Amino acid sequence: MTKVLFVCHGNICRSTMAEFVMKHLLRERGLEREFFIDSAATSTEELGNNVHPGTRRRLAQAGIPCGDHRARQLRREEYGQFDLLIGMDSANLRNMNRILGGDPEAKIHALLDYAGRPGQSIADPWYTGNFDETFDDVLAGCQGLLEQLTGNGTH
């Protein structure tokens, strides 16, 4: 089973969106039993909070349920528990490395790397208010990641 953890600042917008988009893509392909997908935050600001209403609304527009997700923080021991840890921007990646104590196995990546856009960030809709743009970026990244994980793409 391949285990993927999506990470952003608060775990109520981008990483949550990526978690549920990826679960949806896996379900569509009948692959949900081959993967474990989760999400977490680098900060403690939103711990215990539900999915942001804008994220919930945008996922619903795409027919993707997000359930009763609650924000949680990334833990150091999760480095050994996941095959990939995927951040949304350079600040996420920096904080992930700090929390996890480095990346000796090269498991930490940016989501847009998988969309052929290395070094680019997924804008935080908490600040921009643009959940459509964030959704489009998350979808592109998740589709590319899935292609890589199933052997149909390169990274």
Image (cartoon, helix red, strand yellow):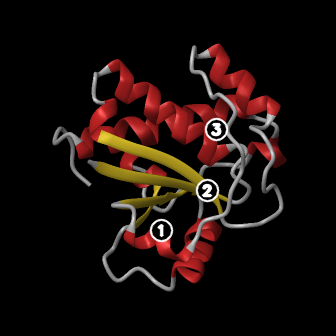
135 sits left or right of 78 in the view: right
> Total of numbered circles in the picture?
3
- Mark 1 near mark 2, Cβ–Cβ under 8 Å? yes
Q: Tell me the tag on residue 134.
A: 3
Category of crowding for the residue at label 1, using alpha-carbon neighbours closer than 10 angstroms: few (below 14), some (14–19), many (at least 20):
few
Please give the residue where the numbered disc 2 appears in the rendered image: 40
Work out which quarter of the rendered image holds the C terminus and state it. Answer: bottom left
Q: Nearer the viewer, mark 1 or mark 3?
A: 1
Q: Give the Cα distance between marks 3 and 2.
A: 17 Å
Q: Tell me the tag on residue 28.
A: none
Where is residue 154? Give x, y as percent.
21, 50
The three-letter code of the residue at mark 3 reads Thr
Q: Give the Cα distance between marks 1 and 2.
A: 10 Å
Category of crowding for the residue at label 2, using alpha-carbon neighbours closer than 10 angstroms: few (below 14), some (14–19), many (at least 20):
many
| Residue under the image location 35 percent in, 44 percent down | 145
Which secondary structure lies at badge 3?
Answer: helix
